[in-house]
Amino acid sequence: MYNLFEFYFIFWLIVLGAVAGSFLDCMVSRWIEGKSLVKGRSQCADCGNTLSPIELVPIISYLAFKGKCCHCGAKIPFECVLAEIAGAIAFAFVGLKFGISLELFKWIVFTALLLPLSIVDIKKHIIPDKIVLLMALNRVVWFFILGEPFLDTINTILISFCMPALLLLVVLAMDKITGKETMGGGDIKLLMVMSMYLDWTQILLTLFLGSVMGILAFFIKKDYSNGIAFGPFLALGCVLTVCFGGNFIKWYLSLFM
């Protein structure tokens, strides 16, 4: 059972996650449109009116104004509130998993970086190298802050790297056979940086969950002209694996022991 303080802690993580999702979605939109990331206030994309603070409250403003601009009535893209919800849920999940600990901050940063990476992949079908490098840097920084055992950590990472490396060989072979790209190189890079955080069993579960959700999305989606971004499904699979996959992995491995 959770005590009152823990509920309070998770509540503020949800708020922080929603704010992070809103902010990062705004930053990605500005970057795609070629606007300054630090100058200018948020505006309605249709009428150009500057949005007031009450219109920028994550999730609540979207619901209060029924998903429309209160100035011109234009529909606000659902992706905006979806990013806020995703941030809120992701931060709550890692908070429940790691509690009030130093390690939580490593996963908060990692999860926060997954948000813009997913948004960019959905909108542009690319996984930015800069975000992948920031994920790698975050892992290195927390390696020293947490004082992790050097040899054990390096050994775990090297073993985990084998999973995306084998996948890369399979993808290259399939590309050669089919004569077209079967999996983006950005997805492989994302799996490689995830290997710095996860062990090999977690990488496999992440890939499995991401693939299942990606296949479901493929059948649900009606327009296939632009394909389906796989990065967000890998990101979601990773968060689910880290926060809830432990017991499933133990159960599965016990079938072979």
Image (cartoon, helix red, strand yellow):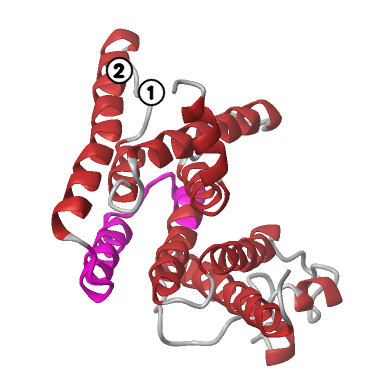
Image location of residue 14, percent across then percent down: 64, 74
Q: Main secondary structure of the magenta part?
A: helix
Marks 2/1 in contact by CB < 8 Å: the verdict is yes
> Does 6 sit above or below residue 68?
below
| Extreme residue toward the top, this view | 177
Q: Could one spot residue 176 in this view of the protein?
A: yes
Q: Label 1: which residue?
A: 182
Disc count in the image? 2
Image location of residue 41, percent across then percent down: 54, 87
Whole-number angstrom distance, CA of label 2 to CA of label 1:
6 Å
Q: Please state the extent of the stretch shown in magenta in the rendering.
A: 119-148
Identify the residue at horizontal 71%, vertical 73% (top origin).
Answer: 2
Q: Element at badge 2? A: helix
Q: Is residue 248 left or right of residue 231?
A: right
Image quarter hosting the N terminus:
bottom right
Mark 1 belongs to which amino acid?
Thr
